[in-house]
Structures are given as C-alpha cells and as structure tokens.
Image: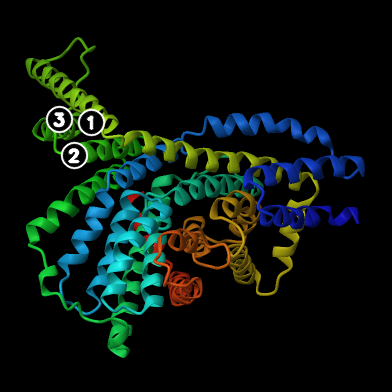
C-alpha cells in the first residue's frame, strides 16, 4: 500500500478539487496530509518540507512572474473601460452583409482582445454580451454562435501575451535546466518568455485561420446556419473602424514588439502595456483628450529617443548635443508623467480604475496561491517517490519518445476536463517535462503543443471555464446543451491544430530561431 502512496495522493487531489473546495487550499492541504501520512508510515523524510521556504522565496522573487499582474491589469483596464466592447461592436458592424462576416469579426476581435488583454473570462463575457445576441437575432445557428464566442475567447491563452505562456515559460525553463543537469551539463541554456511568445505567435494565428475557414466552409455547406445580415446599414466607414481598432493594435505592437525585439524584458513590456491601457481608457473618456494624446506621444518619443540616442548625464565627456538631448528627454518625461497622473485621476473619478485593480488583485492572488500550493504538492510528490515513477512509466511506454509524448498529451487533455490550466501547468508539467526533454523533444516546440492542449481545457465540459462564462451572460433561450454542442467542432479544430504543429514543427520554431 505504501508503495502507491504517490498515486493515492494524486487521486485524493482530484477528489478534493472536484468537491468544490478552493483549489489552492485543496492542493496544499492534500500535500501536507500525505506528507505526514508518508512520514508516519516511514516512506518520506518530513525534513524535506524545510525546502518550502526556499520555494516561497524563489516564487516571490521570480522576475518572470512579476509580468503576470501587469498584463492582467492591462486587460482589466481595457475591459472595465469598455474599450474591448466598442472594438467588438465596431468590427462586427463593419463587415456588413458578408456571409459569415459577423462570425469572422468575432474571431478577429477575439484575436485582438487576446493579444491586448490575455484574459479569457473578460473576452468571453464581452463577446457573449454583445456579439452573441446580435448573431442570434441575425439567424445564426445557436450552437454555432455559442461555439464561436467560446472558442474565440480562448485565443487569449495561446496568442501572446498571456498568463498561460508566462507560467509555462517558467515551468519549461526550469524543466530544461533540470534536464541539462541530469545530462551532466553545467554551462546550461535557459528559455525566455520572449522565446515562448515568439513560438506561440504563428500557431495562434494558425488557429485563427482554422476558425475562419470552418465558419466559411459551414456557411457554404449549410447557409441557413450562417445567414447574410439583412440590415445593409451595419457597414461602417473605414475611418470609424480604424479609430476603434488602431489603438489596440498599436498597444499590441508596442508590448510584443518590445519583447520580441529584445528592447525590453517581459516585465518592462507589461508595464508599458499597463500604462498604455490606462492612457487609452482615459483618452476614451474624452476630457483633456488633447493633453493626454500629447503625453502619450511624448512617452513614445522618449522610448524611441532613449533607444536610438541614449544619454548618460553622469559622464564627463558629454557634447552640447548630449546636453540638448538630455534636456529634451527630461521635458518629455515630465509631460508624460503629468499625463499619466491625469489619466489615473480620470479613471478614479469615473470609477474605472478601482474595479480593474480589484479584478487584477483577485486573479493574481488566485494564480500565485495556486503556484505556491503546487510547489508544496510537487515537493511531497517527489518525497513519496512520484518523480521516479513518472520517469519509469514514460520510459517504459511503447513507441519511445513519440509514445511518451502522445501519452502525456492525452493525459493533459483528459485532465483538462476537470482541472484548470494553472493547476495542470504547475502540478503535472514539472513532473513530465524534464523526462520528455531528456528523450530528445525540443522544449520550445513542446511548450506550444502543450499550450494548445491546455487551451482546450477552457472548452471541455463539464468544467470548461469558457462554458461557465458564456452561460452566465447568454440569453435564457440558449441552453447549456447547445453551448456544449457548439464548442465540440472547435475542440476538434484545436486537436487538428496540435496535429498540424506536431508534423510541421517549423510553425512553432521558426520565429524563435530567427529572433533569438
């Protein structure tokens, strides 16, 4: 019985999570209970828990994970200021009478919101409140409409920046270092967030293309499911469409461009995203718009100037041009700082910043509490011999490295029916990824496959979060069964995307190789 204590611990965790008890407490409580059980049975050294303080300190000082609350804040501000809703409404109406145009616009806006917010819940709720009623009024098949909204909302997990990719990059980097240590390498390589972002970009766009192709093909085969909009007045001028979409695109380019070009770290780029979202939201309010635009322009010029012509005023060999440029940078900084303070004041007055901060604090607390609890769980699991068992199981599977990877992908897909992506990422992946990397799988390519697989956990019943989000805002006439039926084709599309990237790894590895 004692030799299977690690397996019983995993089964107890599943039961605790499914009971509805808070996830972080379920993970930590199960781990501590089995630690003392293993100690009492003589199969675990309880002093191993002394390493927990190091894990807590490492988590709190992890520079990569600091980007999570900043990216969450960026998305929360865009959601609470209704910028996301305006963008969705504008693009939906701009497609006019194109067959399937409304569905395609939902996918495209889901892509933009994914790259600008990275928050699945915010995207699904926004589109469920605006796009879903419009599609239903226009005669779209209710199942298809629900599926489009849910699937488009999950793009926030695969298109960078996203919390999944940030957490995944940290897990993969640690697993890669562990695999190199076990190979006897001590001059180790690491994997950065930028590499994972670059690897996920083309696969994310591939999924967008697959979604759009499905809508077009279904519209061609079953026109009644994807009707043409009857109201011809929905078409908007190009200028109005660009005014709603262009700010978000510029924000995306600023954040991702800074990371992928190496100009800024993910944390620094996340700070740019948060400030950019605050300025965008304040400009949308309309008061002091000209000064806010001036301040935003000054900050952009400051970033460009400091990159192209840096000035170090403490040096003794400065030229007259250096002093002029330094004075100019100070003026730009002062105007930009005043604009930021004014934007914050506007958002506080409009009661937009407070709920955004509350949302950021709630989500960040949930993520970090889960990561911390998972650290305790993995420590106890290793102490009970679980790591050796995982290595033996994967090594003994038929099919070698391919068979082991296929088993892990199926196991992760199955867990997605019951667990959240954070729990799977921080509990399961640290146990299996070092072995998979030792077997010869490219860690960057592996990360993208797993990220798309984890994305399906938002759509798979009974605990798919996108299904819950949509159920909360969907009209009463749309049944839960129709929502479940609507997401089924999109789950198959995600499986197809995994298959495509499996056999065409260049889709995931091309950009990281070029940029890094």
Identify the mark nearer the N-term, 1 or 2. 2
Question: Can residue 513 be seen here?
Answer: no
Q: Secondary structure at mark 3?
A: helix
Q: Where's residue 380, x and y in %?
A: 75, 43
Q: Secondary structure at mark 1?
A: helix
> Quick one: which residue is furthest to the bottom in this view?
221
The residue at which mark 2 appears reads as 285
In terms of image quadrants, where is residue 265? top left
Left or right relative to 51: residue 269: left
Question: Can residue 176 be seen here?
Answer: yes
The residue at which mark 1 appears reads as 346
Return the residue nearer the eye: 73 or 424.
Answer: 73
Q: Where's residue 128, x and y in %?
A: 36, 62
**In which quadrant is the N terminus drawn?**
bottom right
Identify the mark nearer the N-term, 3 or 1. 3
Please report the residue visible at 78 percent of the width from the left and 52 percent of the height from the top: 9
Check disc 3: other Cα within 10 Å, few if <14, some if 14-19, many if 20+.
many
Asked if marks 3 and 1 touch (Cβ < 8 Å), the reply is: no
The residue at which mark 3 appears reads as 295
- Image color mode: rainbow
> Quick one: which residue is furthest to the front in this view?
476
Asked if marks 1 and 2 touch (Cβ < 8 Å), the reply is: yes
Q: Where's residue 58, x and y in %?
A: 58, 32
């Amino acid at each position: 019985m004692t030799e299977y204590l690690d397996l019983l611990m995993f089964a107890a965790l599943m039961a605790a999570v499914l009971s509805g008890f808070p996830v972080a407490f379920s993970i930590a409580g199960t781990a501590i209970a089995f630690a003392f059980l293993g100690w009492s049975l003589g199969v675990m050294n309880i002093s191993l828990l002394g390493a927990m303080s190091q894990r807590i300190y490492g988590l709190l000082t992890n520079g990569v994970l600091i980007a999570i609350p900043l990216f969450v804040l960026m998305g929360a501000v865009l959601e609470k200021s209704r910028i996301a809703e305006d963008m969705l409404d504008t693009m939906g109406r701009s497609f006019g009478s194109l067959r399937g145009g409304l569905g395609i616009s939902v996918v495209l806006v889901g892509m933009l919101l994914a790259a600008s917010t990275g928050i699945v819940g915010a995207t699904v709720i926004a589109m469920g409140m605006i796009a879903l009623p419009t599609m239903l009024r226009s005669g779209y098949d209710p199942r298809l409409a629900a599926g489009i909204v849910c699937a488009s909302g999950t793009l926030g997990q695969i298109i960078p920046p996203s919390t999944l990719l940030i957490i995944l990059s940290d897990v993969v980097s640690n697993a890669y270092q562990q695999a190199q240590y076990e190979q006897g390498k001590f001059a180790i390589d690491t994997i950065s967030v930028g590499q994972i972002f670059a690897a996920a970009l083309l696969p994310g766009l591939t999924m967008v293309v697959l979604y759009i192709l499905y809508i077009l093909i279904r519209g061609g085969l079953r026109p009644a499911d994807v009707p043409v909009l009857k109201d011809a007045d929905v078409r908007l001028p190009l200028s109005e469409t660009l005014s709603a979409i262009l700010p978000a695109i510029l924000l995306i380019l600023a954040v991702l461009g800074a990371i992928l070009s190496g100009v800024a770290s993910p944390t620094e780029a996340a700070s740019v995203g948060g400030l950019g979202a605050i300025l965008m939201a304040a400009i949308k309010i309309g008061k002091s718009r000209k000064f806010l635009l001036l301040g935003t322009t000054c900050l952009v010029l400051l970033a460009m100037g400091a990159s192209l012509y840096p000035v170090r005023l403490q040096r003794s060999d400065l030229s007259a041009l250096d002093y002029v440029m330094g004075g100019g940078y100070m003026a730009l900084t002062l105007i930009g700082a005043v604009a930021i303070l004014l934007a914050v004041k506007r958002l506080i007055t409009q009661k937009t910043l407070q709920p955004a901060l509350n949302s950021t604090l709630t989500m960040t607390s949930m993520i970090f509490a889960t990561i911390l609890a998972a650290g305790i769980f993995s420590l106890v699991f290793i102490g009970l011999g679980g790591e050796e068992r995982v290595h033996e199981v994967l090594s003994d599977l038929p099919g070698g490295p391919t068979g082991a990877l296929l088993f892990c992908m199926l196991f992760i897909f199955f867990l997605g029916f019951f667990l959240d992506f954070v729990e799977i990422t921080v509990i399961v992946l640290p146990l299996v990824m070092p072995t998979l990397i030792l077997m010869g799988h490219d860690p960057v390519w592996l990360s993208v496959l797993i990220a798309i697989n984890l994305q399906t956990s938002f759509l798979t019943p009974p605990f798919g979060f996108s299904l819950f989000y949509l159920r909360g805002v969907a009209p009463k006439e749309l049944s839960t069964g129709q929502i479940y039926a609507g997401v089924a084709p999109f789950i198959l599309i995600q499986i197809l995307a995994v298959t495509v990237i499996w056999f065409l790894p260049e889709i995931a590895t091309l950009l990281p190789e070029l940029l890094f």
